[in-house]
Image: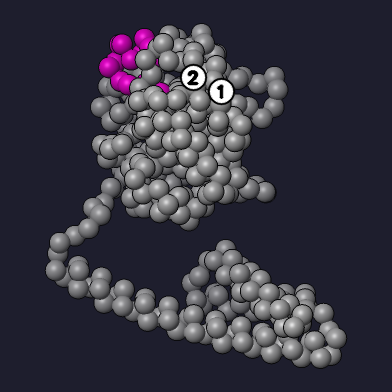
Amino acid sequence: MKLKKPFIIAGPCSAESEEQVLSTAQALAASGKVDIFRAGVWKPRTKPNTFEGAGVEALPWLAKAKEMTGLPIATEVANAKHVESAMPYNFDMLWIGARTAANPFSMQEVAEALRGTDIPVFVKNPVNGEVDLWCGAVERLAVCGVKNIGLIHRGFSGFGAGALRNAPMWHLALEMRRRMPELPMICDPSHICGCRQYIADISQQAADLNYDGLMIESHINPDVAWSDAKQQLTPDALAALLDSLKWRAGESTSESFQTALMGLREQIDSLDREIFQLLAERMNVAEEIGKIKRENDVRILQAARWDDIMERALARNSSLGLSEHFIRTLLDAIHIESINRQNRVMNE
């Protein structure tokens, strides 16, 4: 499936009333920057007694918005009944949410309901940080003959509060793209951010990583939205944001660019060889430590020693300019491999 690039999907988190849907759609169409108008009809909510969407009542509102503005329309489906209800209203795109994508039973039900359809179906990444689960959701659609499949990266849930609602974990999205390069991938900065102030930055990161487009929530009056009010933009604010983004070329034919890039990549390759050689030597030392511990009947894990290594690495980092997250992630991986090496030696 080929998309215009950048491909922009926009509209309110949820369809609240016919007036809200039509006024938002008209404003977005007038901007000339939106390719598909979206609105949630069925809303999966964590807690009961919250607004869970207007349901089938809202389907004609979106159809009317399409008729009035000429914009194609899209909504989320989570079960076979949703698919069956939406189909008569000539939706141009459907998407499958993160909670549904994480449930193989729900995915199979939706896939069966969509069997053989030509309508584009985009799959959001599951809430879990598992690429295999995302692949499985896509494969269920493909096995049922769904022909036009796309991906939406909306971030991953994690423990603890942070500035962003969902951690981007860009590396997982990029790994999914590596596995399925034929599928278009768009970014959903609204759900990654959870608030307006970070949407521009996340959108630009997606553009820099060669995403095919964006899905951004836009409401005619976000402050009174019935769901996700903090992460929605007015149509005017959305247009300004889209104007501010820079979608760079994938390549350059400039000879000076190619020469400079080749030289820097050679440096990277050389440094990588040195890094891995040093890591191999470090693991050899870890194995020697394992032998000494075995001979002296000492346990492998020495928590105080590891805490000291981490503290010293973080202290030195002030002059290195590396992020604390990177230092911790790298050292954790080294620690796990060191323990595995020592454990192997201890049990020889």
Say if mark 1 contacts mark 2, CB within 8 Å.
Answer: yes
How packed mark 1 is, by other alpha carbons closer than 10 Å (few <14, some 14-19, many 20 or more), is some
Q: Residue at x 50, y 28 (%)?
A: 111
Residue 88 appears left or right of 26: right
The Cα–Cα distance between marks 1 and 2, rounded to whole angstroms, is 7 Å
As rendered, which of 229 and 277 lies closer to the eye? 277
How packed mark 2 is, by other alpha carbons closer than 10 Å (few <14, some 14-19, many 20 or more), is many
**Quadrant of the image containing the N terminus:** top left
Percent x, y for residue 73? Answer: 37, 21
**Quadrant of the image containing the C terminus:** bottom right
Percent x, y for residue 7? Answer: 31, 36
SS for tag 1?
loop
Percent x, y for residue 304? Answer: 78, 77
Q: Which residues are magenta?
A: 62-74
Q: Amino acid at mark 1?
A: Asn
Identify whether 289 is placed above or below 57.
Answer: below
Identify whether 263 is placed above or below 210.
Answer: below
Q: Amino acid at mark 2?
A: Val
Q: Residue at x 31, y 11 (%)?
A: 67
As rendered, which of 201 and 82 lies closer to the eye? 82
Dominant secondary structure (helix, strand or loop) of the stretch shown in magenta:
helix
Percent x, y for residue 266? Answer: 31, 78
Q: Kindly tell me whether residue 224 is visible in this rendering.
A: no
Residue 208 appears left or right of 58: left
Residue designated by label 1? 79
SS for tag 2?
helix
Q: Residue at x 57, y 70 (%)?
A: 330
Query: Is 32 included in the stretch rendered in magenta?
Result: no
Furthest residue in direction right, as rendered: 297
Q: Kindly tell me whether residue 43 is visible in this rendering.
A: yes
Residue 83 bears which disc, if any?
2
Residue 161 bears which disc, if any?
none
